[in-house]
Amino acid sequence: MLTPSDAPTSALHHNDREDIWELSKLPRKARPKATAGHYRILEHRSLADRYMALTLDAPAIAQATQPGQFLMLTAARRGQKTPALPRPMAIYSTDIKSGTIEVLYGVVGSGTKVLQSFEQSEEMFVVGPLGRSFEIPEGTRRVLLIGRGIGTCSLTTVAQANSECGIETIAVTSAREPSAVIGADYYRTHGAHVYEVTDQAGNSAPEALFATLTRDLDNNPPELILTCGSDRLTRLSEDLAQRWRARVQVSVEAHMACGLGYCHGCASGARSEGDESPLICNDGPVFSWEPVPAGVSAS
Ligand SMILES: Cc1cc2nc3c(=O)[nH]c(=O)nc-3n(C[C@H](O)[C@H](O)[C@H](O)COP(=O)(O)OP(=O)(O)OC[C@H]3O[C@@H](n4cnc5c(N)ncnc54)[C@H](O)[C@@H]3O)c2cc1C
Ligand code: FES
């Protein structure tokens, strides 16, 4: 593990910036066909008293998933009417050989409370894989992943995919305290260099991370930075991208009713040529984060 604890601190230079950055749709590419069905739960356990880890027997989804895609999990059991709306969850890992997929989630409200009550060998209604994945351009050698808390779950499959095609991964996983750090071991299993940072250790603030990452990576910086929606981490990614001339992609979260592009309840705020802003479920959740082109006013 790389240790950032002794890094010098240095201020981020937001005030020096002239350009404004915004979400933008990634170029459309063919994506895998989603399936909908009842899938058997192979394992459902608590993780560090804080999160739940759910493993499903879902070969079609394991086979099709691209990094950064998500599922809609229905908490209502067969024959039950509530909770009526499914809940979006990132696909944390896939295993094509065993035909399994894994989801990590926090129990925060009514839907996830019911999800938590599902037991091994029960079936759950699942739709996926959904949404647009992270796009790693041809020729990319190094990718930096920056995630915090449960948001990290949308980044882990990138490390898995990178390890299969020889792309180096550097992963920052941040949390309030050590027991809330997500994905560190998983990242290591897939050959990533890992920075585990916490508020408790005092090394997770964007300024501290900026200092650590520039100290360690300035000599051989990543071409691509992928992050997961936190405002502060997106700004940090932007600062690093400006310094390294790297590109940024961000996975955005929103409340979702359908996850399929039907209800139009998840506008992203990204600029659009039509009347409606791109939808997070259908045009995202992964977007490019890039400077507003010259001559265009920010949305
Ligand atoms: C694409 C995507 C991937 C996601 N992946 C994961 C994941 O891997 N693991 C995980 O734990 N969660 C993930 N989430 C968030 C997850 O969907 C919500 O936590 C869940 O729907 C909450 O349902 P609930 O009924 O328990 O809570 P609710 O009763 O609906 O809400 C409880 C609290 O959580 C807040 N909340 C609910 N949904 C969201 C949201 N999308 N963004 C911010 N705040 C929210 C509510 O405002 C409220 O304060 C993801 C969301 C999206 C859009
Ligand atoms: S959640 Fe229904 S359109 Fe996005």
Image (cartoon, rainbow, N blue to C red):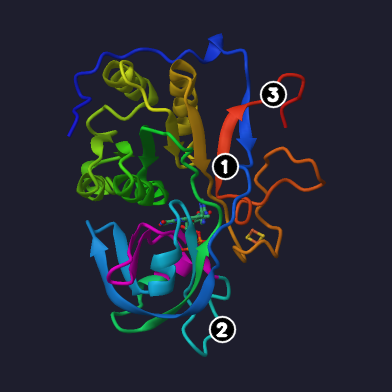
Q: CA distance from mark 2 to mark 1?
A: 34 Å
Q: CA distance from mark 2 to mark 3?
A: 47 Å
Going by the numbered disc 2, the residue's amino acid type is: Lys
> Which residue appears at 50% of the width and 29% of the height?
247
Going by the numbered disc 1, the residue's amino acid type is: Phe
Q: Position of residue 31 (x, y in %)?
A: 56, 58
Relative to 238, 217 lies left or right: left
Within 10 angstroms of label 1, few (less than 14), some, or many (20 or more) residues? many
- Element type where label 1 sits in the image: strand
Residue 100 in magenta?
yes
Read off the residue under disc 3: 293
Task: Answer whether residue 195 is visible to the viewer in this image.
Answer: yes
Within 10 angstroms of label 3, few (less than 14), some, or many (20 or more) residues? few
Q: Position of residue 255 (x, y in %)?
A: 58, 56
- Element type where label 3 sits in the image: loop
Read off the residue under disc 2: 81
Read off the residue under disc 1: 287
Going by the numbered disc 3, the residue's amino acid type is: Pro
> Which residue appears at 45% of the width and 28% of the height?
237
Task: Answer whether residue 231 is visible to the viewer in this image.
Answer: no
Tell me where the magenta segment starts and ends, as one range. Answer: 86-114
Among the two numbered marks 1 and 3 on one chain, the one whose residue lies closer to the N terminus = 1
Among the two numbered marks 2 and 1 on one chain, the one whose residue lies closer to the N terminus = 2
